[in-house]
Amino acid sequence: MHLKRQLLFVQGGGAGTHDEWDNKLVDSLQRELGPEYEIHYPRMPDEDEPSYVQWKATLERLFGTLTDGAILVGHSLGGTILLKVLAELSSVPEFGAIFLIAAPFVGDGGWPAADLQFPPDLGAHLPKGVPVHFFHGVDDEIAPLSHVELYASAVPQAHVHRLQGRDHQLNDDLKEVAAAILSLEPGRVGSRK
């Protein structure tokens, strides 16, 4: 029996985000990836007033339900929290890749938030050997393009994708994200070995 590849999509924060905004991103991703992928899209606690402590506990529990090779995708504040959790874990499951979409940077030059402050060498704290991709819309007015530039410095091993004409929701179109995910599969052009 062939198992589907698992993907965990972590929503952004804000009232109605799960059902009115990020569900469109998940739908786009599922369309582009096809039936070989099983997307887990949990409702995060108190989305209208996200708490790092609550979201961290939820993510750590969810990580325990994933199979080796699962793909992690975080949008907006969900991506920021996902990175912070991954940087703090002492034991990390075998993830296939990490994808951050329009993630606000927290720290100097980014958003202030004491409970989300990253270590200065963030890249060194992320799971070793796991590809990291940042996708950011050039026209993002919520987390300006300068945020992805800060991530590019903090996570030097990351692949940074700046998308022209795209907003904070990447215009509800994740075809580039899906293409990068699919390229990780053995046998596909551009895939890693």
Image (spheres, rainbow, N blue to C red):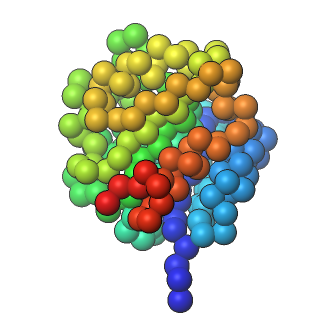
Residue lying furthest top in this view?
A: 109
Label count reads: 0
Q: Position of residue 60 (x, y in %)?
A: 40, 56
Residue 147 appears in view = yes
Residue 103 appears in view = no
Say which residue appears at 35% left-offset and 35% top-offset.
158
Nearer to the camera, 115 or 99:
99
Q: Quadrant of the C terminus?
A: bottom left
Please tell me whether residue 17 is drawn above or below residue 109 in the rendered image. Answer: below
Apparent side of residue 66 relative to residue 167 in the rendered image (left or right): left
Residue lying furthest front in this view?
A: 189
Residue 53's image quarter? top left
Nearer to the camera, 157 or 88:
157
Say which residue appears at 29% left-offset and 57% top-offset.
92
Please tell me whether residue 86 is drawn above or below residue 170 in the rendered image. Answer: below
Apparent side of residue 10 relative to residue 150 in the rendered image (left or right): right
Apparent side of residue 33 relative to residue 60 in the rendered image (left or right): right
Q: Position of residue 177 (x, y in %)?
A: 56, 44
Residue lying furthest right in this view?
A: 20
Please tell me whether residue 79 is drawn above or below residue 72 in the rendered image. Answer: above
Q: Position of residue 189 (x, y in %)?
A: 47, 55
Residue 123's image quarter? top left
Say which residue appears at 38% left-offset and 25% top-offset.
151
Q: Position of residue 91 (x, y in %)?
A: 24, 57
Nearer to the camera, 98 or 185:
185
Say which residue appears at 48% left-offset and 60% top-offset.
188
